[in-house]
Amino acid sequence: MNLILQNGRQVTHPIEESLRIAIDGEEVFSGFTFDQVTRKLVFDAAPPVAAIISAGFEFDVPVRFENEQLIATRTVNNAGEVSDITLLELRF
């Protein structure tokens, strides 16, 4: 089972320790794992066909800097100021 957000976006990098699963509104604490290779939630035994499965979790979004260089300026008290750092999401 893929982890899909309500907006339809598939999550491929959930933080496994934060994963919470509920079947028909009842939280379950065992009987499932997250397969890091296939990026899918795997149940030891299939839930009932009509069951509503929900999940809560934190997740990472892999990104990279858009540019190879960052331009910074010095301001008062040697505090650095960097403007316009653009990150690009990496899709796998």
Image: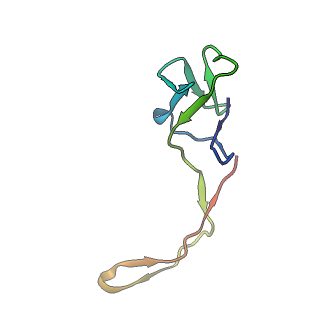
Quarter in which the N terminus is drawn: top right
Q: Nearer the viewer, residue 55 or 69?
A: 55
Left or right of residue 56, residue 51 in this image: right
Q: Position of residue 83 (x, y in %)?
A: 51, 77
Figure label count: 0
Q: Nearer the viewer, residue 9 or 22?
A: 22
| Residue drawn at x 53%, y 73% as measured from the top left | 70
From this viewpoint, which residue is outermost toward the top?
A: 45
| Residue drawn at x 65%, y 34% as measured from the top left | 39
From this viewpoint, which residue is outermost toward the bottom?
A: 76
Q: Nearer the viewer, residue 78 or 88?
A: 88
Q: Position of residue 41 (x, y in %)?
A: 62, 28
State whether residue 63 is above or below residue 43.
below
Q: Position of residue 75 (x, y in %)?
A: 37, 85
Left or right of residue 2, residue 56 in this image: left
| Residue drawn at x 63%, y 23% as measured from the top left | 42
Q: Nearer the viewer, residue 11 or 87?
A: 11
State whether residue 48 is above or below residue 57.
above
State whether residue 44 is above or below residue 87.
above
Q: Position of residue 82 (x, y in %)?
A: 47, 76
Q: How is the image coloured?
A: rainbow
